[in-house]
Each structure stands twice: as C-alpha cells, then as structure tokens.
Amino acid sequence: MPRDDDGVSPDEEVDEERRRQRRAGDPRITPEGRELLRRLTNGDLQDELKAALNAVSDSNPSFSGSHDSEAD
C-alpha cells in the first residue's frame, strides 16, 4: 500500500478517522436526543421503555428470543 509523506497509508487514515468519530459520538444526535436516550436507558423513562419492549416481545414471539422452533 502506498504511503504519503508522513508514512500513513490511505487505509490507515480512514481507520483513524473512524476511531476519532467513534470517540466523539454520533454527530447526528442532538444534545436533546442524547438527553432523551439517557433518560430511556438510565433515567426516569427506563421503566416505560422496558414495558414497551416487553409488550413488543409478548405480541411477537420472534422478538422475544424464546421462539418455539417446534411450531415452525
């Protein structure tokens, strides 16, 4: 792989840019969105999210992870 003047290949530059982006977080999420995600996963909306996920799992066995393979 050819290297540029500083000894870094284009693939290494791409990898480093991806690492920087991961460390910085997703720029598409606004501060308000981050706060909502925090509340859903660790805050006051956690119980509501859990109840909603349980309702989805109960209504569709393929989402629950306990799908009965004998019924196929």
Image (tube, grey):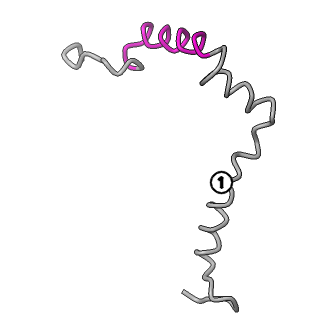
Q: Nearer the viewer, residue 32 or 9?
A: 32
Q: Is residue 66 above or below residue 17?
A: above
> The C terminus lies in which quarter of the figure?
top left
Q: Residue at x 18, y 16 (%)?
A: 70
Q: Main secondary structure of the magenta part?
A: helix
Q: Is residue 14 magenta?
A: no
Residue 53 located left or right of residue 62? right
Q: Is residue 42 above or below residue 48?
A: below
Q: Is residue 16 above or below residue 60?
A: below
Q: Tag 1, which secondary structure? A: helix
Q: Is residue 11 above or below residue 27?
A: below
Residue assigned mark 1 = 23
Q: Position of residue 20 (x, y in %)?
A: 67, 60
Q: Position of residue 65 (x, y in %)?
A: 35, 22
Q: Is residue 60 magenta?
A: yes
Q: Residue at x 62, y 61 (%)?
A: 19
Mark 1 neighbour class, 10 Å CA radius: few under 14, some 14 to 19, many 20 or more:
few
Residue 29 located left or right of residue 15? right
Part of the protein shown in magenta: 46-62
